[in-house]
Image: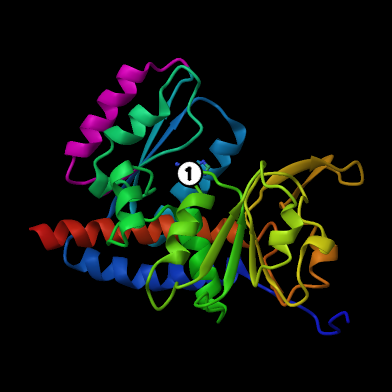
Amino acid sequence: MKSSHKPLIINGKQIASEILEELKHEISDLRAKKVTPGLAVVLVGDNPASEVYVRNKRKTCEELGIDSFAYDLPDTCSEKKLLKLIDKLNADPKIHGILVQLPLPRHINEKRILEAILPEKDVDGFHPVNVGRLLNGEDCFVSCTPAGCHALLLRSGIKPAGKHVVIVGRSNIVGKPLAALLMQKAANANATVTICHSNTRNMSKYTQEADILVAAMGVPEFIKPRMVREGAVVIDVGVNRISDPTRKSGNRLVGDVAFSGVSKKAKAITPVPGGVGPMTIAMLMKNTVKAVHMTLAKR
Ligand code: GUN
């Protein structure tokens, strides 16, 4: 039987703005104590999508009272030069967090760059020390998109404990850390987690089992209604620009979920845009404030 009720459309923009409002107060308390959070945002090259992300990150810093230090380097920047910049930022006490926007140009070894960032300034949570701590269930920086998905669930009143969470996608940025986060032995986690990927046979068998289905494989509208259980919660991490001649721009953004059909079956679903996206930035700001508190605790 099809559900007759309308699904809850999880408003990521609204939830993110609530988190940013909370952070604003926390930052103003810090500033009153003469501590101004500082975030270095490094962009290499001219990837148009990265430029948009970086602009939004810097703008949000400004709105919150975080000092944003912008480093825009040309596509031709050498790995050595970038490593030197990271060393400088690591040593700078005004900078609490360092973010290097990915992807990097092909001639730069991404792994080497991410490993050069001090783990205590790694607000993106990409350093192997933070990834390891996450897996061990220790306090650490959790990468922003998985942290955003988790916060979105909790703040929508959806508790992962005991639920079957099926994540489609096994990236280091989303799928793997989200699995680690939700399987944690912790009151806000405690989920049973399955990861599916491009080599999974009979994927629908797994996705249809999901109480909470997370689409994070980067394929436009991959998750079809028949793959989703009636009453499931669906979190769409995908951001894909597809051609749409009916639009003035000639294109539009879609997620990894075929929204119109899937929303008829889901109990709750995130839209694209306005779902997970805004949460990613909010979590970056939260991690930056966390980095400040870590510095203060060490004083
Ligand atoms: N590129 C796509 N997502 C991200 C992210 O969360 N952080 C960084 N640094 N780059 C990205």
* Image quarter in which the C terminus is found: bottom left
In the image, is residue 211 above or below residue 175?
A: below
Question: What's the image's color scheme?
Answer: rainbow
Image quadrant of residue 198? top right
Q: Residue at x 54, y 63 (%)?
A: 193
Q: Is residue 36 visible?
A: no
> Can residue 112 be found in the magenta stretch?
no
Whether ligand 1 has any atom under 8 Å from the Cβ at mark 1 is answered as no
Please name the residue shown 78% across and 75% down the image: 230
Position of the N terminus by quadrant:
bottom right
Residue that badge 1 annotates: 172
Q: Position of residue 167 (x, y in %)?
A: 60, 57
From the viewer's perspective, is residue 182 above or below residue 158? above
Is residue 89 shown in magenta? yes
Residue 187 visible to the viewer: yes
Number of residues whose C-alpha sits closer than 10 Å to that of mark 1, classed few (under 14), some (14–19) or many (20 or more): few
Image quadrant in which you'd find residue 14: bottom right
Q: Work out whether residue 151 or residue 292 is closer to the camera in this orientation and state it.
A: 151
Residue at position x 92%, y 46% in the image: 246
Determine the residue located farthest toward the front in the rendered image: 201
Compared with 247, 34 (above or below) is: below
Q: Secondary structure at mark 1?
A: loop
Left or right of 204, for residue 158: left
Residue 170, given in percent of the width and then of the height, sits at 55, 46
- State the extent of the magenta-drawn residues as a range: 76-98
Residue drawn where x is 42% and y is 29% of the image: 110
Residue 136 in picture, x, y percent from top left: 31, 58
Q: In the image shown, does 225 or 64 lie closer to the viewer?
A: 225
Q: Is residue 115 left or right of residue 175?
A: left
Relative to 55, is 72 on the left or the right? left
Residue ranking furthest to the left: 299
**Amino acid under disc 1:** Asn
